[in-house]
Amino acid sequence: MKIGCIADDFTGATDIASGLVRGGLRVVQMFGTQGRLADEGSVDAVVIALKTRSAGKEEAVRQSLAALKVLLGGGAQRILFKYCSTFDSTPEGNIGPVADALVEHLQCRSTIHCPAFPGYLRTQYMGHLFVGRELLSESGMRHHPLTPMTDANLVRFLQLQTPARVGLIDYPVVASGPEAVRGALASLESDGIRHILVDVLDETHLATIATAVADRPLVAGGSAIGAALVPVWRSTGLLAAETFPPPRPQLDGATVALAGSCSAATCRQVATFAQTHPCLHIDLLGVTDTAEIVQEAVQWADLHRDEVPLIATTVPPERLREIQAALGQHAAAELAEHLLAEIAAALLDRGFRQFIVAGGETSGAVASRLGISSIRIGPEICTGVPWTASVGAPSVALALKSGNFGSDTFFEDAWRRLQQC
């Protein structure tokens, strides 16, 4: 194992793991740090999925350093700190504190931050993050229930999270090539800058940045920079030339889709899938007895087990605001996660073996409740979302999707991709 990754949520972990697999690496993803680390010779990279995106600073740092210890103990020579391509956080968030702790533990002078993911139209220009043509702060991310993104200026935003200085390598420098980026890094470091954001408009810029930073022990950002680093690491000899195809999950049993995300993309995906498959929507404001709701949902899904049923707590922004006003922001999220996780566990007992899950927090809750400690990353459904197979018991296949990922036909695409395995 040469590459170690610390991801701040479960779907973000499968996102970057999928990018590494796309580059021909053998990748295992662990949920937390309690599972058994894969044999060093059987994998090229290990991704540790944490559930720290919305955690307090101290807890996020504690868990991240524990993950770092596991990865370094397993032989990792490069560390990736993976967070969302939309920089999901708050002014009091933990991206800055975790990056500070990793820099200090690894005795680096700095780390770059490269959240951009051009393949999903997440680009950064002059320090401002865009989603398509919209500034991050004007996109649907401004309505995120846990991390509403209201400032697209990442230099300013990250500076709120850390006492260390934040700087920028802007587009003209990146467009000038790897040597220009290396020179800018050295200059900023000499000025005492610890956190260095880099502009990215396209895949060429990712390749430029990867070439410039491949020898650094720590890189922070989204999954796209991780994938871009693979061919550079291979060319320098850090990784072997041999590539490996993704393993394919081959499991019997029924398939169910579970949606907890309230992102605009997931709302569209739920609506599209419901046109051709049975869909049960759980109204959180109508929940008085969680055990009863779980039992009813499980019985309903069992009746439709041959039709790939979908169970969702997904609602549009206006309804989400009503629910949060009545229940509280975090209480509403926790209720949705609890319900879907308990439903998943009960369906496992009834022979469901394939789970398509939409939403980072939801995915974390489901995987934890099913008792899955690690997974092998398999074939992609779409960019950043693979099918995975559990390591050990229970034997299940999981597709864990970040809320904003995938086309409108994602659930159908996931099911059809599974049929090809």
Image (cartoon, rainbow, N blue to C red):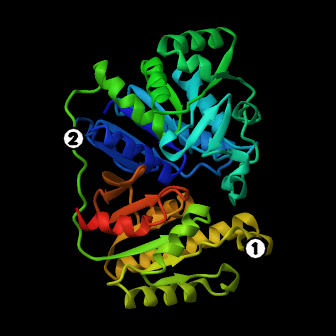
For marks 2 and 1, the one nearer the N-term is: 2
The residue lying at 32 percent from left, 84 percent from top is 306
Q: Residue at x 75, y 73 (%)?
A: 327
Give the position of the C terminus as an image quadrant.
bottom left
Question: Which amino acid, by three-letter code, is at mark 1?
Answer: Leu
Q: Residues within 10 Å of mark 1 (few under 14, many from 20)?
A: some
The answer to whether residue 308 is left or right of residue 395 is right
**Going by the image, does 128 lie left or right of 401?**
right
Numbered disc 2: secondary structure? loop
Marks 2 and 1, how far apart at CA: 48 Å
Residue 34 visible from this viewpoint: no
Give x and y (percent) for residue 65: 54, 36
| Residue positioned 58% across, 68% down in the render | 267
**Figure disc tally:** 2
For the view shown, which residue lies furthest in the front direction? 133
Q: Which residue corresponds to the image point at 54% horizontal and 44% vertical from the top-left?
A: 121
Residue 261 lies in quadrant: bottom right
Q: Residues within 10 Å of mark 2 (few under 14, many from 20)?
A: few
Q: Is 317 placed above or below 302 here?
A: above
Mark 1 sits on what residue?
Answer: 327
Residue nearest the observer in this picture, 412 or 157: 412
Residue 100, percent across and down? 63, 29
Task: Give the percent coordinates (x, y) of residue 337.
Answer: 57, 69
Which amino acid, by three-letter code, is at mark 2?
A: Phe
The residue identified by callout 2 is 244
